[in-house]
Amino acid sequence: MQVTHTEASLKAAIEALELERSADARQLKSQLMLTYDHIQPINLIKRTFREVGSSRELKTQMVSSAIGMAVGYLAKSLYVGKSANPVRKMIGAALMYGVSDLISNNPELVSSAGKGIARWITSGKGTPDTALPESPEKALHE
């Protein structure tokens, strides 16, 4: 059984399909532009920084790592100094890695030590556990 179509109904069907195709093409182009914009490197970097900025845990971890690296570098610099000795430099590198790792993995240790040092500085009483004598002469006579 064959269906007969009139010329007018075929033209109407063709026009409807062409409209549908152009709407689909516009939608596809719009989606393509959104996808292109989404995967541009600068936008990837921006999104990453936005995510980092919104994550409190990640901020804490980054600060802890930065402090660890800084203290590790300081420890290496203090140990090695201006020495040209290669063994001393290797030990300094190991010290830097160890201190950085220790501080990065134990931020609560750094926090409590920092609070203790801050209390010690603000109290002005020598070491955190003991108070300095008022004058060196009194210490010698005691």
Image (tube, grey):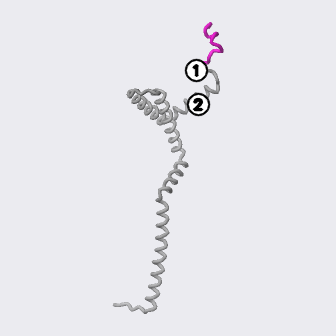
Asked if residue 60 is positioned above or below residue 37 in the image, the reply reads above
The quarter of the picture where the N terminus appears is bottom left
Q: Mark 1 or mark 2, which has the lower sequence index?
A: 2
Query: Which numbered circle lies on residue 5?
Result: none
Report the number of numbered marks.
2
Rounded to the nearest angstrom, the CA distance separating label 1 from label 2 is 14 Å
Question: Residue at position x 50%, y 33% from top?
Answer: 71
Q: Nearer the viewer, residue 105 or 46?
A: 46
* 139 sits left or right of 82 in the view: right
Query: Which numbered circle lies on residue 115?
Result: 2
State the image coordinates of residue 122 (x, y, percent, origin top left).
64, 27
Q: Main secondary structure of the magenta part?
A: loop
Q: Give the extent of the magenta segment.
A: 128-142
Report the amino acid beneath label 2. Answer: Lys
State the image coordinates of residue 97 (x, y, percent, origin top left).
43, 33
Report the amino acid beneath label 1. Answer: Asp
Instruction: Give the residue furthest to the right.
Output: 134
State the image coordinates of residue 6 (x, y, percent, origin top left).
43, 92
Q: Are marks 1 and 2 in contact (CB under 8 Å)?
A: no
- Residue 133: quarter of image: top right
Query: Which numbered circle lies on residue 129?
Result: 1
The reply to whether the magenta stretch includes residue 1 is: no
Answer few, some or many: residues within 10 Å of disc 1's Cα (few below 14, many 20 plus, some between 14 and 19): few
Q: Nearer the viewer, residue 110 or 137?
A: 137
The reply to whether the magenta stretch includes residue 137 is: yes
* 42 sits left or right of 120 in the view: left
- Residue 117: quarter of image: top right
Question: Residue at position x 39%, y 30% from top?
Answer: 90
Question: Residue at position x 46%, y 91% from top?
Answer: 8
The local secondary structure at tag 2 comes to helix
Question: Residue at position x 55%, y 31% from top?
Answer: 112
State the image coordinates of residue 95 (x, y, percent, origin top left).
43, 30
